[in-house]
Image: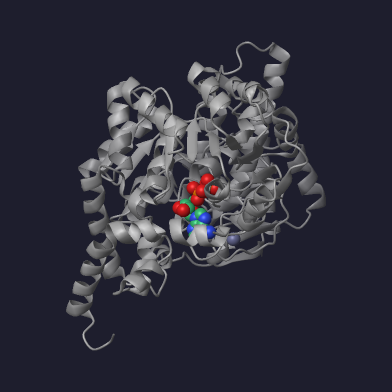
Amino acid sequence: MTPQEVLQQYFGYDTFRKGQAELIGAILSGRDVLGIMPTGAGKSVCYQVPAMLLPGLTVVISPLISLMHDQVRALRENGIPAAYLNSALDEMAYRQTLAAVYNGGVRILYAAPERLETESFARIAAEVPISMVTVDEAHCVSQWGQDFRPSYLKIVNFLQMLPRRPLLSAFTATATKEVAEDIVRILGLHDPYSVTTGFDRENLYFGVQQPRDKFRALMEILQEHEGESGIVYCLTRKLVEEVTDKLNENGFHARRYHAGLPDAERAQNQDDFLYDRVPVIVATNAFGMGIDKSNVSFVVHYNMPKNLENYYQEAGRAGRDGSRADCILLYAPGDVRTNQFMIEKSNDNDQLDELTRTRLREKEQERLKLMTFYCTRHECLRNYMLRYFGENAHNFCGNCSSCRANYEPRDITVEAQKIISCIYRLHQRNLHFGVTSIIEILRGSKSERYEKFHFADTLSTFGIMADVPEKQCREIVDFLLMENYISKTDGEYPSLTLNRKSAQFLKDHPKLIMNIVKEEQPSSRRAERNLPDDVNAELLAILKAECAAAAKKEGVPSYIIFTNAALQDMARKIPTTEMAFLAVSGVGRVKLEKYGTRFLRVIRDFKADHMKGNS
Ligand code: ADP
Ligand code: ZN
């Protein structure tokens, strides 16, 4: 068989994605490889396809038991003899698996790195011909990375123990140059064929909203995504509780997840989410490690996270099967303070000396600032992120809220002068106000609060922005704060103050340009976009239900049977014969045998009922 045939027969895909064919070709020609590809790009296929073509066993080292579980189930569903060895197996199952490995009944064996030191593995190493060792999440071997796992160093010992050096392949989604070098050096990859496909996830829509009422905005998003699976991230446990309760009060089904919950409840909630018994999980950033649910259609951030690394990782849990998905961040200026506070109070680095800790904090504050720019600058969000991660990017992606909204660059030099002079004049009179008051004064508020100051008669800047809507004033003030043209004092009632940059600005008045929304985009656009035009939505809903029923019977999450991407392709091609069913992306030989009859019946019934005369 050729790699292409394996891809078609077992995985049900017609063509390789970017990087896959090259990596597979290199492996089959006997070279070590290093694949750096973003989440959802299809790294697994890169070692699973060759594993079916190499003569001996492929051992896959993977750090997370839950991921192994999923991968093995999915492979078996495709008719590929795969198994795993980890602490989750009872003794009986462990022995059965070992026996299958010895007599050649397993082609792909997943194991956690800790397993490699066990006696059973020493025996496998001695008795079973191993063609390839694949290291998944290979960045865990590097101390540069955030996820260093000392147990990954055991891989090296294991390799040395083998009578013949197998091929080595290593994969990761996140590797800076240093980390990539570490992977090659520490694992001892021989002149590896390397592929880096870039960070971009084209199927993800990125959006930032700054709603007056976050909860309401959240409900709107959930309504648009009815019947789909999604994650809502909050910054604090307290907020997780609040949002979950309010959602359930409002008729949405949601579960909570954070590190403060009893283990049993946490595990239960996670499982209910994975098995689609509940569509939405509200969580702190504790949720997600080792979650490989491929049919997550949206990730909402109820708060801005503290940096773009975290954001991209969390948002990236949407759309792993390649179908379109939404990543929406609900921003409020208050999120900045909460994060600042959390950074100041964090004691993650207790063991470090004071100086290093201060440096790390400064670095964190800097990252926070760049995260905030993501939310406030109205630049193309995708490209802002790609540049942050060190890639070249264009200025327009067409699939983010900035590119889709009607932003227009506007010269705000005059407004900035007015705002800064107003603060300046007030300071001359020893008066200090916060954002809201300053805006009220600029817009000439008649509130009693200001009567005693007689601003109308004595303050030249009183009411000079009466013609600018309040919301826009606020946007401009936020912009000036972000760009450091003005500052805010600390404390419970922060007031606006001037700094060196303000003075410089009043002196030189350089031109200031800011992107301003011309018109709010209708929120329904997202939902429309999420389903490609040629997909029959009605049939899709029926197929999803059928898939859920089949999954329930098998006791697996439904995405193990068919991914959303596969179901969408089915509702696009509307196959009524076995041949046509096999042409659906994600339907291989085994899936056809197992589920063909059942799904074809549903599709034929649908066609008979709904599409008379147009087939
Ligand atoms: P990664 O490990 O890189 O995050 P996966 O290997 O889990 O990504 O693949 C993501 C999804 O893409 C899976 O649903 C997988 O079946 C699918 N996929 C992989 N390769 C292809 C391909 N060539 N064509 C279509 N879908 C693919
Ligand atoms: Zn864009």
**Which residue occupies 54% across, 31% down?**
128
In which quadrant is the N terminus drawn?
bottom right
Q: Is residue 216 left or right of residue 414?
A: left
**Which residue occupies 35% across, 38% down?**
282
**Which residue occupies 69% across, 19% down?**
358
- Farthest right residue? 508
Q: Is residue 34 above or below residue 123?
A: below
Near-viewer residue (86 or 455): 86
Give the image location of residue 391, x and y in percent. 71, 51
Near-viewer residue (537 or 371): 537
Hey, which quadrant is residue 142 in on the image? Answer: top right
Give the image location of residue 28, x and y in percent. 65, 50
**From this viewpoint, is residue 459 visible?**
no
Hey, which quadrant is residue 348 in on the image? Answer: top right
Give the image location of residue 85, x and y in percent. 44, 28
Near-viewer residue (382 or 170): 170
**From this viewpoint, is residue 179 visible?**
yes
